[in-house]
Every structure is written in structure tokens, then in C-alpha cells.
């Protein structure tokens, strides 16, 4: 018997007005973009989206993020759509999460960060990947114990003594802290081993190439095409979590190493930087980057900006980069766009799924290495 799917309503608090007042704030998604991406994340996690709601905020409500009126509107929508889950695009504080759960009973309240962590937990295959995801989950959990702790601290105890709940909270914090320290030690050993493998590759004087790009841009499909193998490639976000490296041969009969990496995303939650470390290290050590771009996506330009911003944060934007516009087979009447892109330096148009343009891409890589 198949498991019943969660039915979710997506919630987006538009904080653009607040962002404008903060000169250092990163770009905030517009509503349509944010909800579309959140829908894709929910689909990847096996959750059915049955509605969405938006509120423009000039001031964040510290108790529930959104205003009281919008909370009441949410209650009605949950009842009307028979929803059992609320997914906020914005990251919720422990207090906001607890208050919303109390206001809208029998409904799971979560946010985009927790949703991505769940997806990562289901996608991790290697020992390192599992450790990285567990670490990210524990870091997230350590900042979200307060809400439960307030409830626990009401159990027993007087004014001068700590209640059993408060002691339980302290015990949870200590266990999480100890586990985080242990995982970091284990990851250090794994990274040391991977570092030795990387040095051995460098001794062979082979050019190393990393595929980077927004999640679901087609990096794994391209690696399969180049290496004639079958690395997992699905039409879902974060289908690939662990970096995969393969040998490929260029038209010049030159052998190079190509690594697939985990896809980037707008506003990457800080807790996930640990889970991305393997990808970051692979990218930092590469000689050439292939930036895979979903040519068919209606928010392509925004996705390109998000990847470029991440590469700047990694301080690798000065590496040789070839922009690879993928999924040309999904475009209709795109002659003008194709002509424009074709004129750009170090840009190539391909379809990883059909093989169109692959030879041209390999020639571009060959020429770049020769330079």
C-alpha cells in the first residue's frame, strides 16, 4: 500500500522593502520565482503542493513572521485544501515555528532550509555525503531547540531549581555538540584521504575540469554523455549530492578528468555550507570550470547570477570558465537567442540529452587547454 503524500501550502513573506533598507542584503527572490522553486523542492521531497500564499512585509512579526490576519487566512486555507503541512520560503526562528504550530493545529510547520536538509538526507549515498548531511542537520537542530526547550522547562521544578525539561534540553544540547565534534573529526580524515587522491591526480599532470551550475541544469546528464556512463541523473533538484569524477578523451586525444558537483541554489542556507565542502574543494582545485546553464528555464538569467555569486564567494571566478547553454532541444523559436549566445566568447550551446553540440564543446575545451 502506497504511503499517503503530504499536502502542503507554500508561504512566502516578501521582505523586499526590508531588504532595500539593508544595503548588504543579498538579492531576494520575487514571489513567482520563489514559489516555483519551492514547488520543485517539495516535488523532489515527495510532497504535493495544494496552494500558496504571499504577504508583503514592511516589518517582520517576531512571533509568527507573517501578520495575525494572514495567520487566520492560512488557517482557512489549510482547512479548505485539507493541507497537513506548511512550508515557508523564509527561514523561521524556533519561536515562530512553535507559535505557528500552536495557532494552526494538526499542521506540520517547516521552512525551506529544513526541506532542503530532508532532500539531502535522502540523496546522500557515500559515507562522506551522509556525514556532511548529518552535520548540517545537527547544526540546524542546535539552533532550533529553544522552542521545544521552553515547553520542556515547564515540566517540574520550582523557582530555585531547574525543571526536568530544562535539564533535558541541556542534555540534548550537549549530545548534539559532542556528535558535531565527532563528525567533524571523521570528515577531516575523509578529506585528508581525498586530498591525497587529488595530489596523485595532479602528479599525473592531467587537466581537471569541474561541472558547476544551478541545480537541475543537466550536469549529471552531461557527464553521462561525455564519459558514456550512467551516473544518476533525474529531473529533480539535487539529484546528485556526492562529487563524481570520470576520465574523458578530447578530440586531440588528450585525456582529462571531469567532476560532477552538487548543484547550487539561490540563498544557500548557511547550515549547508558544510555539506557543500566536497564540491567546493573539487571546484577550487580544478583547472577549468564548465558552467552548465539551463537554456530552457524562464529564470535562466537569475540562476546564472546565483551561480556566479557563489563562485565569487568561493574566490574561483577568475578560473577559465566555459558557459555551456544546455537543453537547447527544449526551446521553441530560439534562433535569435542561439545566435546571440553563439557570438559570446567561451560559450557553447548543447543538448546533453540528445548529444547536440557536444563535439563543439569538446573542441572548446581542447582549445582552452592549448592556450
Image (cartoon, grey):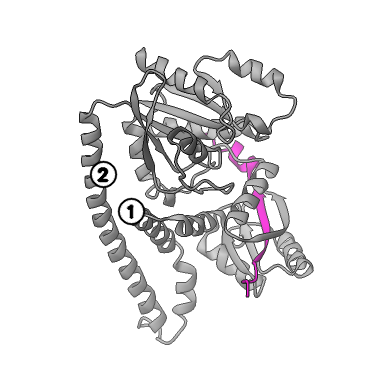
- Relative to residue 178, is residue 198 depicted above or below? above
Q: Residue shown at 76%/64% (left/top)?
A: 77
Tell me residue 268's x, y (percent): 49, 45
Label 2, residues with CA under 10 Å away: few <14, some 14-19, many ≥20: some
Q: Residue shown at 42%/87% (left/top)?
A: 156
Which corner quadrant of the image does residue 282 belong to?
top left
Which residue is tagged 2? 194
Residue 235 in sight in this render: yes
Tell me residue 149's x, y (percent): 45, 73
Q: In this orientation, which residue lies closer to the viewer: 305 or 286? A: 286
Residue 58 in sight in this render: no
Whether residue 113 sits left or right of residue 67 in the image: it is left
Which corner quadrant of the image does residue 297 belong to?
top right
User: Which quarter of the figure is the C terminus placed in?
Assistant: top left
Element under disc 2: helix
Which residue is tagged 1? 128
Whether residue 311 sits left or right of residue 39 in the image: it is left
- Relative to residue 60, is residue 225 depicted above or below? above
Whether residue 321 sits left or right of residue 28 in the image: it is left
Proximity of marks 2 and 1: CB atoms separated by less than 8 Å: yes
Q: Is residue 10 magenta?
A: yes
Tell me residue 16's x, y (percent): 64, 41
Q: In this orientation, which residue lies closer to the viewer: 370 or 26? A: 370
Q: Earlier in the sequence, mark 2 or mark 1?
A: 1
- Relative to residue 147, is residue 202 depicted above or below? above
User: Which quarter of the figure is the N terminus placed in?
Assistant: bottom right
Q: Which residues are magenta?
A: 1-23
Tell me residue 103's x, y (percent): 66, 71
Element under disc 1: helix
Q: Residue shown at 24%/30% (left/top)?
A: 202
Q: CA distance from mark 2 to mark 1?
A: 10 Å
Amino acid at each position: 500500500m502506497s504511503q499517503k503524500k503530504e499536502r502542503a501550502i507554500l508561504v512566502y513573506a516578501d521582505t523586499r522593502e526590508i531588504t532595500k533598507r539593508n544595503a548588504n542584503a543579498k538579492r531576494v527572490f520575487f514571489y513567482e520565482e520563489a514559489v516555483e522553486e519551492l514547488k520543485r523542492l517539495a516535488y523532489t521531497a515527495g510532497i504535493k503542493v495544494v496552494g500558496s500564499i504571499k504577504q508583503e512585509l514592511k516589518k517582520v512579526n517576531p512571533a509568527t513572521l507573517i501578520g495575525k490576519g494572514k495567520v487566520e487566512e492560512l488557517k482557512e486555507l489549510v482547512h479548505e485544501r485539507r493541507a497537513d503541512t506548511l512550508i515557508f520560503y523564509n527561514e523561521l526562528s524556533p519561536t515562530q515555528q512553535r507559535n505557528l504550530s500552536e495557532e494552526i493545529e494538526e499542521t506540520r510547520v517547516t521552512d525551506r532550509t529544513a526541506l532542503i536538509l530532508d532532500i539531502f538526507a535522502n540523496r546522500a549515498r557515500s559515507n562522506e555525503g551522509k556525514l556532511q548531511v548529518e552535520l548540517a542537520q545537527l547544526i540546524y537542530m542546535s539552533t532550533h531547540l529553544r522552542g521545544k526547550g521552553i515547553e520542556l522547562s515547564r515540566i517540574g521544578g520550582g523557582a530555585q531549581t531547574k525543571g526536568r525539561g530544562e535539564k533535558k534540553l541541556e542534555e540534548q544540547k550537549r549530545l548534539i555538540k559532542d556528535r558535531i565534534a565527532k563528525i567533524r573529526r571523521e570528515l577531516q580524515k575523509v578529506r585528508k584521504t581525498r586530498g591525497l587522491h587529488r595530489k596523485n591526480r595532479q602528479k599525473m599532470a592531467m587537466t581537471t575540469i569541474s561541472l558547476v551550475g544551478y541545480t537541475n541544469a543537466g550536469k549529471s546528464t552531461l557527464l553521462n554523455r561525455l564519459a558514456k556512463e550512467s551516473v544518476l541523473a533525474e529531473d529533480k533538484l539535487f539529484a546528485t549530492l556526492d562529487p563524481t569524477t570520470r576520465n574523458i578523451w578530447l578530440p586531440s586525444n588528450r585525456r582529462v578528468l571531469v567532476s560532477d558537483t552538487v548543484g547550487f541554489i539561490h540563498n544557500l542556507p548557511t547550515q549547508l555550507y558544510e555539506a557543500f565542502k566536497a564540491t567546493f574543494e573539487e571546484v577550487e582545485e580544478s583547472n577549468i570550470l564548465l558552467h552548465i546553464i539551463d537554456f530552457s528555464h524562464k529564470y535562466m538569467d537569475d540562476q546564472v547570477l546565483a551561480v556566479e555569486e557563489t563562485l565569487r564567494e568561493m574566490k574561483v571566478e577568475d578560473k577559465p570558465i566555459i558557459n555551456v547553454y544546455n537543453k537547447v532541444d527544449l526551446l521553441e523559436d530560439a534562433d535569435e537567442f542561439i545566435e546571440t549566445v553563439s557570438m559570446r566568447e567561451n560559450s557553447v550551446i548543447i543538448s546533453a540529452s540528445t548529444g547536440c553540440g557536444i563535439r563543439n564543446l569538446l573542441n572548446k575545451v581542447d582549445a582552452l587547454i592549448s592556450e
